[in-house]
């Protein structure tokens, strides 16, 4: 017997949505990714989602329409994926849909705070004819947690190997690390920016969405004063549990760090890019060495795993650790996070907890997600 679920993930990079069809087998057997589709966002949707990350006019109206547009993009990805896998909607138990984070302020303001993932899950269920599990983060935040990262539980289920201390680093827009101890203990937290700052610097100076394979950064030289300004960011130094987003790592943050360097007018854009790449790697290295110094292996996933410069610098900074993409452990780098949301959807329908309180700081284990029944 196999249960099919679809995971739908669109992260802070705002590059589009990844949809994976996952087959879950009886306990003890590994899950299998049957198909994967990446559907890029239209420039209009991307721009609006980006704008909604900051306070602006008429946000309720605009975010409702953006949620509708996002749900149509998700539904299109599901339709392409089902065609590719030759499956009908009724053969899929549920969709696990993350939605688009536009604010992430857990524990702030009134002590509870909030995290907002835009999605019209009712519309997604209407368009696909499939049950939808969504709003995964809210329950953990209600239980006093960060609501993030939610993937360590899945990373442990997919990658844990008895007898070896290892970590999984997801380099999405933001970077998060999962620490998987040999004895089965799981820790994790957001450790800094992944690609978000590099992407915006590329867009500004090259007009490209990202630095393909990190070639541009690789040819620049790291500016030590600028790097020191970045590393002293309080979020990097703060102890876990912790999570972040574009709320912190945005264009003004970067401009402020650059402005803090004497003679910054003479900083070459390429050198800033090299410094940003180094910052991403250094934050990950600090996180790993601080939280699980005995780790022997680091599996890298997310789009940043395709950045060969980042992969090389991580390997250089962690000489005693085997640094490799998650592909080497059986799950392609671009499929890991979406597969996690298929797993979280299954956990919800199985009434199993999806969060790790040791990661998020929540008061306890909680079943995550809300549900729309397709009918
Ligand atoms: N070939 C590549 N070279 C360098 N970076 C890449 C490449 N492909 C993707 N990326 C980076 O990965 C990002 C997307 O990663 P992803 O895991 O989807 O993040 P998110 O979960 O935030 O959407 C892109 O914005 C880009 O920065
Ligand atoms: Mg993405």
Image (cartoon, helix red, strand yellow):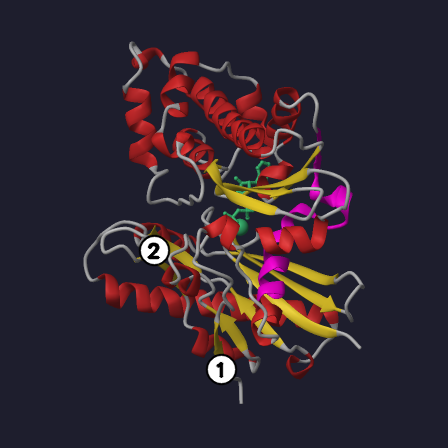
Q: Is residue 349 visible?
A: yes
Q: Which residue is mark 2?
A: 48
Q: Is residue 120 above or below residue 301?
A: below
Residue 204, by quadrant, is top left
Is ligand 2 closer than 8 angstroms to the Cβ of mark 1?
Answer: no
Residue 244 drawn at (x, y percent):
40, 44
Q: Is residue 42 above or below residue 265?
A: below
In which quadrant will I find the N terminus?
bottom right
- Packing grade of label 1 (10 A; few <14, some 14-19, many >=20) is some
Q: Is residue 336 magenta?
A: yes
Q: Quick one: 329 or 258, which is closer to the camera? A: 329
Q: Residue at x 40, y 64 (%)?
A: 138
- Packing grade of label 2 (10 A; few <14, some 14-19, many >=20) is some
Q: Secondary structure at mark 1?
A: helix
Q: Residue at x 46, y 51 (%)?
A: 360
Disc 2/disc 1 C-alpha distance (Å): 24 Å
Q: Secondary structure at mark 2?
A: helix
Q: Is residue 149 visible?
A: no
Q: Residue at x 44, y 78 (%)?
A: 122
Q: Is residue 17 magenta?
A: no
Residue 41 drawn at (x, y percent):
48, 56
Residue stretch in magenta: 322-344
Q: Quick one: 124 or 313, which is closer to the camera? A: 313
Q: Which residue is mark 1?
A: 126
Q: Quick one: 257 or 289, which is closer to the camera? A: 289
Q: Is residue 163 above or below residue 158?
A: above
Residue occupying the far bottom of the picture: 375
Find ligand 1 in the image and state its quadrant.
top right
């Amino acid at each position: 017997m196999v249960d099919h679920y679809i995971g739908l993930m669109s992260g802070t990079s705002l590059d589009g949505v990844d949809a994976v069809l996952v087959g879950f087998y009886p306990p003890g057997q590994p899950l299998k990714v049957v198909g994967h589709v990446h559907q890029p966002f239209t420039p209009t949707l991307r721009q609006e989602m980006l704008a909604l990350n900051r306070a602006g006019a008429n946000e309720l109206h605009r975010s409702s329409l953006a949620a509708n547009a996002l749900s149509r993009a998700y539904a299109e990805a599901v339709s392409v994926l089902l065609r590719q896998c030759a499956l009908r909607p009724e053969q899929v138990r549920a969709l696990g849909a993350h939605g688009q984070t536009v604010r992430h302020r857990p524990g702030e303001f009134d002590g509870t705070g909030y995290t907002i993932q835009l999605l019209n899950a009712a519309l997604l269920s209407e368009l696909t004819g499939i049950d939808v599990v969504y709003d995964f983060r809210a329950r953990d935040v209600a239980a006093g947690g960060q609501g993030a990262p939610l993937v360590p539980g899945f990373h442990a289920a997919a990658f844990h190997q008895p007898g070896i201390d290892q970590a999984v680093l997801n380099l999405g827009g933001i970077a998060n690390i999962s620490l998987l101890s040999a004895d089965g203990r799981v820790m994790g937290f957001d450790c800094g920016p992944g690609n978000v700052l590099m992407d915006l610097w590329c867009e500004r100076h090259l007009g490209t969405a990202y630095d393909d394979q990190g070639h541009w950064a690789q040819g620049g030289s790291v500016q030590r004063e600028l790097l020191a300004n970045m590393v002293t960011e309080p979020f990097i130094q703060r102890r876990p549990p912790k999570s972040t987003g574009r709320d912190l790592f945005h264009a003004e943050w970067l401009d402020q760090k650059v402005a803090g360097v004497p003679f910054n007018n003479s900083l070459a854009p390429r050198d800033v890019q090299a410094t940003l790449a180094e910052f991403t790697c250094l934050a990950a290295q600090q996180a790993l060495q601080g939280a699980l110094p005995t780790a022997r292996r680091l599996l890298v996933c997310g789009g940043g795993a395709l950045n060969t410069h980042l992969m090389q610098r991580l390997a250089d900074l962690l000489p005693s650790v085997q640094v490799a993409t998650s592909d080497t452990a059986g799950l392609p780098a671009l499929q890991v996070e979406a597969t996690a949301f298929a797993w979280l959807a299954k956990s919800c329908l199985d009434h199993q907890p999806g969060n790790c309180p040791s990661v998020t700081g929540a008061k306890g284990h909680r079943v995550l997600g809300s549900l729309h029944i397709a009918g």
